[in-house]
Image (cartoon, helix red, strand yellow):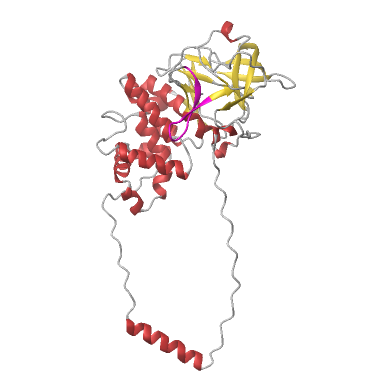
Amino acid sequence: MSVSVSTNDLALKLLLAAVPEAAKALSVDAVADQLSQLDLDGQHAEGTNAVAHLLAAKYDSELAGTTDAEQAEVSQWMTMSARHGPVERQTFAQTLNTHLIQRTFLVGNRLSLADLVAFANVHPYMTSLTAQKRFAVNNFSRWFDLIQHSLSADALAKAGIQLVEIDLNAPVQAKKQAPSAAKDKKDASAAKDKKDAGEPKAAKKKEKKPQPAAKELVIVPSMIDLRVGHIVDVEKHPDADSLYVEKIEVNEDEPRTVVSGLVRFIPIEQMKNRDVVLVCNLKPASMRNVKSFAMVLCATSTDGETVEFVEPPKGSKPGDRVYFEGFEDGTPEKQLKPKQKIFETIQPGLFTNDGREAGWYDADKKFHKLMVGGNVCTTATVVNGSLK
């Protein structure tokens, strides 16, 4: 059993440190420029949230919530906390500040995955805040301080997280003293004397032109290259029981090789000749010595027991563009740069709704349907499930 943790995945590093049973039982590998992955008991998970849920199910199920309602809320907070960028972080902090007015933890009355993952995700943001700004969101700061002190110093150190000094008292504003009239008069007199004495003027310094500020990257779902694919061949991975190796036609010179962790959920007979939605511009990744050149988009039920294809509408053809409603005119990136975390920012908002329609929830919780040629992509049975 092994887990591959992305070098910048602070949340999973913290979870493994906080659940020592998992760290002892698993072979942990650090990987760069790809999503964290976990193979456990015949199941394969990719991405921070999916791996965290699988770890919790194995080693501490209560972390994911004890009721269906709590489990859904835990997933929601994990999703919201994963959105990157200063604006998204500020919005999330303000949302938490309101949510925590009469709460100790994000969900229920005990520490959950929501607290651990959200804490790790907002840690860099909290370190950037001044004491005054921390006090402005004092409920958020109180919660942050509680979580960091609920974890052992050893767990924080293993995750590479430093304690943040949180002062919940109102910061003292230093009073500025107005200069005295006498001092002003004295300075003016001295300046006049220098002028009268014919003091040479100081050499005029050449002013440096201000450098233009780096343009902030605005991440939108149209950056992801989604296309209709058709599975023309599939076989078991030679070195991993939980993985399939597929050949998928996307109207290119040759089919793409794609590795998917679907063995536990979809029989091989149901994999063949299926139309699917492919994420085509992720950086190719080797999975047990087989390089995968895309990712099949699937929906996972809230209990994690059902995984299904996101299905393009009838009449779709291999290579057809798949887009989010409202972002039809956007142009996908040629290849997503792992350091920009474009997919990681969008993926936590990917869900199906009550009607099994696939789409993306933006920061205002508006649902943008996933479309092909004006028709929506759906799942067979999964409602309110995450997409990955």
* Farthest residue, direction right: 253
- Residue at x 36% of width, y 29% of height: 113
Which residue is drawn at the image coordinates 41% and 41% (left, top)?
91
Closest to the observer, 339 or 359: 359
Does residue 364 lie above or below 129 as drawn? above
Seen from this angle, which residue lies furthest bottom? Answer: 197
Which residue is at 27% across, 54% downward?
Answer: 170
- Image x and y of residue 343, in percent: 54, 32
As rendered, which of 7 and 318 lies closer to the eye? 318
Is residue 170 depicted above or below 70 in this figure?
below
Q: Position of residue 65 (x, y in %)?
A: 33, 23
Name the outermost residue toward the top.
269
The percent coordinates of residue 297 (x first, y second) are 55, 21
Residue 111 on image: x %, y %: 30, 31
Residue 67 is left or right of residue 299, and the answer is: left
**Direction front: furthest residue:** 374
User: Would residue 294 be seen by someone viewing this image from the given angle?
Assistant: yes
Q: For this rendering, which residue is in front, 322 or 180?
A: 322
Q: Which residues are magenta?
A: 356-369
Q: Is residue 26 magenta?
A: no
Residue at figure coordinates x 48%, y 39% from the top left:
84
Quarter holding residue 247:
top right
Residue 358 is covered by the magenta coloring = yes
Is any part of residue 148 visible from this angle? no
Q: What is the count of numbered marks?
A: 0
Q: In this picture, is 245 found above or below 345? A: above
